């Protein structure tokens, strides 16, 4: 997580959310849940969770050659060929 852009979102995070998508209106992926946060004696399930954005997930799918074809065609290839 140290080298990736991380979002901290306010939510009712629960144990077991790790690896799940965080979806925004209208059904866009903000990222993948990595952990929940608490504060001192406050349980972790009562406040915030960290999300890693979708880019590392896409990179992992590409590196392991397991990206679905529609995702590669609609999202990954246009991203990789876009000018910097």
Image (cartoon, rainbow, N blue to C red):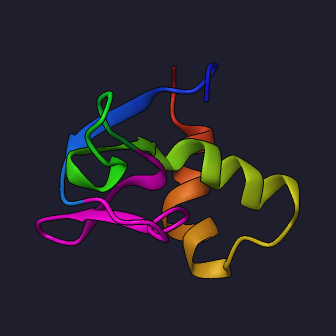
**Tag count in the figure?**
0
**Quarter assignment of residue 8:** top left
Query: Is residue 80 shown left or right of residue 82?
Result: right
**Quarter assignment of residue 53:** top left
Query: Is residue 55 shown left or right of residue 10?
Result: right
**Does 82 sit above or below residue 77?**
above
Q: Nearer the viewer, residue 32 or 37?
A: 37
Q: Residue at x 75, y 52 (%)?
A: 60
Residue 12: x and y in percent read 20, 60
Q: Residue at x 74, y 61 (%)?
A: 61
Q: Nearer the viewer, residue 1 or 37?
A: 37
**Region in magenta:** 13-36
Residue 1: x and y in percent read 61, 30
37 in the magenta segment: no
Residue furthest to the front = 41
22 in the magenta segment: yes
Residue 72: x and y in percent read 63, 66
Q: Nearer the viewer, residue 70 or 15?
A: 15
Residue furthest to the left = 25
């Amino acid at each position: 997580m140290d080298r990736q852009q991380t979002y901290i979102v306010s939510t009712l995070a629960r144990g077991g959310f790790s690896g799940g998508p965080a979806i925004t209106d209208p059904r866009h992926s903000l990222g993948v849940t990595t952990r929940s946060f608490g504060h001192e004696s406050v349980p972790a399930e009562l406040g915030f969770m960290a999300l890693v954005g979708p880019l590392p997930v896409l990179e992992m799918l590409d590196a392991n050659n397991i990206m679905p074809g529609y995702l590669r065609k609609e999202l990954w290839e246009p991203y990789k060929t876009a000018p910097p």
